[in-house]
Image (cartoon, rainbow, N blue to C red):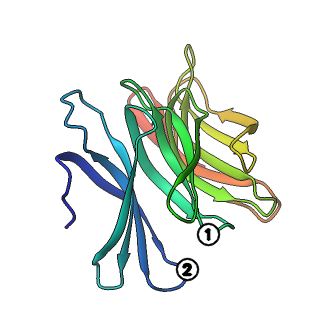
Amino acid sequence: IYSNYTYGNQIRDILLAPDGSGYYALGAVNIDFDPMPNESNILLMKVNNWGEREWERVYNPSHFDAGLCFSNTYDKGFIIGGTIGGPVNGRGGLLKVKPNGEESWNRWYFGYGEITGVTQLADSSYVAGGSDWWFGVELQMGIVKVDSLGNKLWHRRYGGIYDDYGYCFAPTLDGGFIMAGRQDSIGVASVYI
């Protein structure tokens, strides 16, 4: 158990280290002791094969940040998806981390919501998906493609007149993407692919 922080601690994703030396864990912690709800920071941690912590980094791009998913990148760093935003609500965003653990860039792409899946493509761009809400529109599944520097190339939303949540996504063999989640309607929640 890793509990260096006061409250708001969670691990949301884990990756095997490519060299087999342990695991990388990603999540959210609250280290600024602020009593305001939903204040959190992104945590990236490396543990060895015996579960002993080797190092950790905390990233605080804004007030409400949480790491929900991540993947290795071709430069041996990480691309982190989750919420980046504030002061109270998170916005779906990405944070790029260099191989030495330093932050390279961070951007938010969705109004209010979260990115729950991210992958790097062969051309070094990134595609991320999750739940996306803009003013005046219900929550919808969202997918965004950005270049290697985080500049948005395109952004799509999918959904109906009720809330639609994107929980996970993957590239498909035809060059597209598949996303799974939930679609809400009055009194019912349905599986959504």
Q: In the drawing, does residue 63 fall left or right of residue 79? A: left
Going from the N terminus, do you reach mark 1 or mark 2 first?
A: 2
- Category of crowding for the residue at label 1, using alpha-carbon neighbours closer than 10 angstroms: few (below 14), some (14–19), many (at least 20): few
In the image, residue 172 lies at what x, y percent? 74, 61
What is the secondary structure assignment of the residue under circle 1? loop
Position of 177 compared to 48: left or right? right
Q: Nearer the viewer, mark 1 or mark 2?
A: 1
Which residue is identified by label 1?
76
Residue 54, position as x, y percentages in the image: 34, 74
Q: Which mark is residue 18?
A: 2
Tell me if I can see residue 169 in this picture: no
Q: Based on the displayed image, in which of its 4 quarters is residue 39 positioned?
A: top left
Would residue 31 appear left or right of 26 to someone viewing this image? left
In this picture, is 41 found above or below 89? Answer: below
| Contact flag, marks 1 and 2 (Cβ < 8 Å) | yes
Neighbor class of circle 2 (other Cα within 10 Å; few <14, some 14-19, many 20+) is few
User: Residue placed at 49% from the left, 33% from the top?
Assistant: 113
Does 84 sit above or below residue 134? below
The quadrant in which residue 12 appears is: bottom left
- SS for tag 2? loop
Q: Amino acid at mark 1?
A: Lys
How many numbered callouts? 2
Residue most toward the top? 136
Residue at position x 50%, y 29% in the image:
163
Q: Left or right of 107: which side holds 11?
A: left
Q: Position of residue 154 (x, y in %)?
A: 77, 37
Residue placed at 18% from the left, 29% from the top? 35
Q: In the rendered structure, which amino acid carries the disc numbered 2?
A: Pro
Residue 158 position within the rendered picture, expressed as x and y whole percent measured from the top left: 65, 35
Residue nearest the viewer, comparing 122 with 41: 41
For this rendering, which residue is in front, 184 or 141?
141
